[in-house]
């Protein structure tokens, strides 16, 4: 255990608190905690790379914390009517596809070497930015409806492209692993 992993665990533990704040419609606190969680993602990555704190545990914790945070935020914002249902379904389905593909690969004994693709990184940034924008709008009225709508469509497009990219990568890995 090191500081980078501890920060990832703290981010993971922040998810229930953020969900609770959203359900209580405590927009300002939810926004602040979400921003802190986002900053913690950058900090733990920087610490891991810069100070040699990369571990196998961290390799699992960091993406798990990211997925848990984003899926929870999208589900709750969708439930509360602040995100369209189709987008919530896309985002959650993509993550289920990625995790399910990894589990299936391990169950089949072929393992899975998933390399993040550029559009997936763009998608993650867009998902975080959209969640932050909606929380900022709810808390402070900072953005207009048109900006949020454009961000929704950007997240939708990058989610579909990213999901297709991971599916193609998984398919290639499975074909290579077959005897």
Image (cartoon, helix red, strand yellow):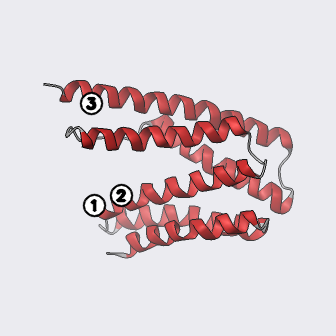
Q: Residue at x 57, y 33 (%)?
A: 158
Seen in the picture, residue 119 relative to 55 is either above or below; the reply is above
Query: Which corner quadrant of the image does residue 5 belong to?
Result: bottom left
Q: Secondary structure at mark 3?
A: helix
Q: Residues within 10 Å of mark 2 (few under 14, many from 20)?
A: few
Dots 3, 1 in contact, CB < 8 A: no
Residue at the (68%, 68%) spot, across then down: 20
- Which badge, 2 or 3, is on the more N-terminal residue? 2
The residue carrying mark 2 is 60
CB within 8 Å, label 2 to label 1: yes
Quadrant of the image containing the N terminus: bottom left
Residue at screen point 45% across, 70% down: 9
* Disc 3 target residue: 173
Q: Quadrant of residue 142?
A: bottom right
Query: Picture coordinates of residue 86 (x, y %)?
Result: 68, 35
Q: Specify whether residue 112 is in view.
A: no
Element at badge 2? helix
Q: Identify the disc placed on residue 56.
A: 1
How far apart are the alpha carbons under marks 3 and 1?
A: 21 Å
Residue at coordinates 35% horizontally, 30% vertically from top-left?
169
**Figure quadrant of residue 151:** top right
């Amino acid at each position: 255990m090191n500081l980078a992993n501890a920060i990832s665990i703290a981010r993971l533990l922040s998810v229930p608190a953020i969900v609770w704040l959203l359900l209580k419609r405590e927009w300002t606190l939810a926004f602040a905690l979400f921003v802190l969680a986002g900053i913690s993602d950058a900090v733990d990555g920087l610490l891991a790379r810069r100070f040699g704190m990369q571990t196998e545990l961290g390799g699992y914790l960091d993406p798990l914390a990211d997925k848990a945070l984003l899926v929870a935020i999208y589900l709750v914002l969708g439930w509360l009517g602040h995100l369209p249902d189709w987008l919530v379904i896309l985002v959650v389905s993509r993550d289920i596809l990625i995790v399910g593909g990894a589990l299936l690969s391990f169950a089949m004994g072929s393992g899975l070497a998933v390399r993040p693709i550029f559009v997936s990184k763009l998608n993650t940034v867009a998902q975080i930015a959209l969640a932050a924008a909606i929380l900022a709008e709810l808390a402070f009225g900072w953005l207009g409806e048109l900006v949020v709508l454009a961000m929704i469509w950007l997240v939708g497009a990058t989610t579909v492209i990213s999901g297709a990219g991971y599916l193609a990568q998984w398919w290639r890995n499975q074909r290579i692993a077959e005897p």
